[in-house]
Image: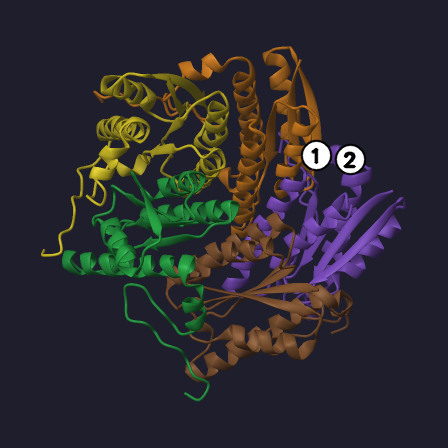
Chain colours: A orange, B yellow, C purple, D green, E brown
Amino acid sequence: MKKVGVVDTTFALVDMAEYAVRALKARGTGFKVLRATVPGIKDLPVACRRLFLEGADLCLALGMPGKAEYDKTCAHEASLGLLYASVLEAKPIVECFVFEGEASGAKELHSLARRRAEEHALNAYALLFRPQELARHAGTGLRQGFADAGAVRPTR
Amino acid sequence: MKKVGVVDTTFALVDMAEYAVRALKARGTGFKVLRATVPGIKDLPVACRRLFLEGADLCLALGMPGKAEYDKTCAHEASLGLLYASVLEAKPIVECFVFEGEASGAKELHSLARRRAEEHALNAYALLFRPQELARHAGTGLRQGFADAGAVRPTR
Amino acid sequence: MKKVGVVDTTFALVDMAEYAVRALKARGTGFKVLRATVPGIKDLPVACRRLFLEGADLCLALGMPGKAEYDKTCAHEASLGLLYASVLEAKPIVECFVFEGEASGAKELHSLARRRAEEHALNAYALLFRPQELARHAGTGLRQGFADAGAVRPTR
Amino acid sequence: MKKVGVVDTTFALVDMAEYAVRALKARGTGFKVLRATVPGIKDLPVACRRLFLEGADLCLALGMPGKAEYDKTCAHEASLGLLYASVLEAKPIVECFVFEGEASGAKELHSLARRRAEEHALNAYALLFRPQELARHAGTGLRQGFADAGAVRPTR
Amino acid sequence: MKKVGVVDTTFALVDMAEYAVRALKARGTGFKVLRATVPGIKDLPVACRRLFLEGADLCLALGMPGKAEYDKTCAHEASLGLLYASVLEAKPIVECFVFEGEASGAKELHSLARRRAEEHALNAYALLFRPQELARHAGTGLRQGFADAGAVRPTR
């Protein structure tokens, strides 16, 4: 049975993991969820690697960087760490970050975080169980959390 | 028989892989294409490494970062991940990124993406099968997607 | 018995390690502290790796970058080094940096550094001994050194 | 017999490798040149690693980033990749980059590229065969492609 | 007997290694100095790794980036390379960089470079032979090349 690691933070303002796990389970079966919660986004890479060493086939890394310039730096560092852990283990890490500044107001932020977590959970599912679905949508401008951009046609 | 990995994203607005694979096959034979599609450009590095572990001798990584400042950061992170995967495996990854902001309008973007994908596919082919062709064009100002810059001569 | 590495610098203006170790010991028992002091924040990553090789299960890396633009660059480099060491060893490094510019005045800086060191020490403890406590606070907007941000609710 | 890898790009506007190899051969004997040409500067790191695996003792990596902001990002990424490959293999990579924007006009660019390629080739030679020559010039403000800066004296 | 690697560049305007080695030898005995000189700061990381492979227990990496924006990028890349080499080998690299722009005028630059090289040499000595000295100065605001900042007290 496949194992999906789901890692999130106590820093985030929304419990994105809850929505992600629900979306995963609503999407299909045949996998087990391994959960971990860490303080902040820079703690995600090692947590993912540890879940890989415990048998995870893929990790979903959920985080919500703050609004300050320094938070962007932290997100950049975390992303590089996630890339390093992922390539090192040769297993996918689906990064799902929602920047506080992306939404205006608490309600919109919650809604964005929920939707992006759900849609990245579906991406994670597809990577593990339905790679042909991703292939079918190659170059079609999919987005997570916002409306899809759609494909650009040569005749437009 | 050589194996060429071709990895693209569902985020991109153009199906660059289709053009790349066609260009590869029009150029020559004696290779097999391994395909993978991932959600976004930051998922490319691990996908390339996984194709290397499945036997790919080279990977072509196709992506289309958006227009926002954050998309540039993501592209930078993805590039570093591709460099890491490539050096780690000691196998070439030909990065082919088209930034949305490089073109004005959908038609031009499509045309640029197609041409760049095709020309990078030819680069990939040359790296694997015709290294002497690359050597013959050393320092001659070749470009992909735009007109070549041409060599600078000492007397100009 | 678990081992907690605590690494700090002679560059910092506050003895954060003292507060961190006190907070650790006040929180619980069943662990041994391994201490190291290095000149500056860029010396922290290798010091952490060395403590891991001596048996540490987790490291707390304490530092205080200065106010200049260059200090931010150094902090960024140090953070990437900490991420690298942590993922490489598959053991957590809790980074606790206080930027001089975060506080106005010596008293406030001292207070911030102390509080953040203590709260990150509690995070370190939780990571090692009480992971379920972190899980319980997933997505609740915890902060270290400042007041917690709190969770955002869908109905607000 | 020592082996010197010389890697350049089809992107560059000047055939720097030609000048570098000539300078190497004019400087001394007892080495063999291993050549590779890749499309762009980001392809240099893996090409160097591959030459190391073929026996190169040192690589000279020649490239010419364009004028745009994005070209600087690419150069930065390429440099990090070269550093990674070099440290990983524990063998020197002499990076010789000429930015288009460093010269005004084609003639000056050609002249700068030639001179820098030649001078970095001599550095490569010294690293392999005459380390004591480098030691003799420690802290003397040597430059490649431009006039040397010279040492700063305590009494000036 | 311990071995201290000391690596510097021909690019620097001051022979910092001379001052560093003198300071090391004035401080104590029981170690051997391994010397290497490379062209520029980006050549330092692999040189350190090579000295580690020759038995160095610690390396002192001395460099002097120029005044231009690009020099800062090079210093950043070199620093990341030094961090990578250091963590990889699990041995300390004491980075001692003096930026040309830090001093106004040649005399001040020379004096700053000398003092910083000497003080970092003492740090290197302490890391190897007197770790308890560093521990005694934890969080006391030590600086290298400039006056110490001193510790911040809770009551000030």
* Residue D44: quarter of image: top left
Q: Is residue D35 visible?
A: yes
Q: Position of residue E35 (x, y in %)?
A: 54, 66
| Whether labels 2 and 1 share one chain | no
Say left or right for E41 vs D99.
Answer: right
Location of residue D1 with respect to A122 vertically, above or below = below
Identify the image quadrant of the N terminus of chain A.
top right
* Residue corresponding to mark 1: A37
| Residue at mark 2: chain | C
Residue lying furthest top = A29
Most foreground residue, C43 or C93: C43
Local SS, label 2: helix
Q: Position of residue E136 (x, y in %)?
A: 77, 69
Q: Name the kind of residue labelled 1 in the image.
A: Thr
Local SS, label 1: strand
Q: Are the residues flagged by discs 2 and 1 in contact, CB closer than 8 Å?
A: yes
Q: Which mark is residue C131?
A: 2
Q: Position of residue D104 (x, y in %)?
A: 19, 60
Most foreground residue, D143 or D29: D29
